[in-house]
Image (tube, grey):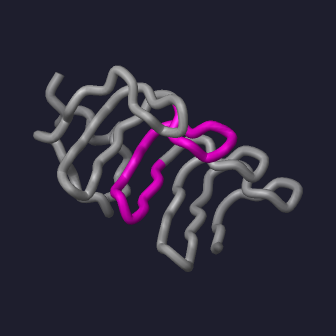
Amino acid sequence: MVYTGDIMNTHPHGIGTLTDITDGEIHKGTFKNGKFIEGIRINNYGRYEGTFNENGDLYGKGIIYYKNGDCFEGNFEHLGVAIRAHDLRSTVQSARDTTPIKQKKKQIPG
């Protein structure tokens, strides 16, 4: 693992990027006491932007872009299972694009 960013008491804390050099998974965003709590996660399945629980699972409000073209926005619970999510396939972006969704929201139809 390679981490660049803010540190407190030898743990990631604040804004940073954590890259797993074995599988290429990237966590870019906010860390608290060594845990990734909000931001962008990119892995072999696609790209997710939102919040995470203390175990690192998708949890709370977020948007997920799968590499196969599926795209969902909603609340995530129970190990990352989406509840009350709606399909956003018409607004799929590249799974490697790390530009924050908040900057692109104007492009997403209501």
Seen at 37% across and 57% down, the residue is 98
Queried whether the magenta region covers residue 2, the answer comes back as: no
Nearer to me, 5 or 32: 32
* 17 sits left or right of 41 in the view: right
Q: Position of residue 100 (x, y in %)?
A: 38, 46
Residue 49's place in the image compared with 21, above or below, is: above
Seen at 68% across and 40% down, the residue is 54
Q: Position of residue 89 (x, y in %)?
A: 15, 41
The image shows a total of numbered marks equal to 0
Which of the 4 image quadrants contains residue 96? Answer: bottom left
Seen at 54% across and 38% down, the residue is 79
* 58 sits left or right of 94 in the view: right
Which of the 4 image quadrants contains residue 21? Answer: bottom right
Nearer to me, 10 or 23: 23
Quarter of the figure that contains the N terminus:
bottom right
Q: Position of residue 61 (x, y in %)?
A: 45, 28
* 72 sits left or right of 74 in the view: left
* 90 sits left or right of 42 in the view: left
Queried whether the magenta region covers residue 43, the answer comes back as: yes
Q: Residue furthest bottom?
A: 22
Residue 6's place in the image compared with 79, above or below, is: below
User: Taken as a whole, is the magenta stretch helix, strand or loop?
Assistant: strand
Seen at 47% across and 54% down, the residue is 41
Q: Position of residue 59 (x, y in %)?
A: 53, 33
Which range of residues does the magenta coloring cover?
40-59
Quarter of the figure that contains the C terminus:
top left
Q: Residue furthest right?
A: 9
Residue 106's place in the image compared with 39, above or below, is: above
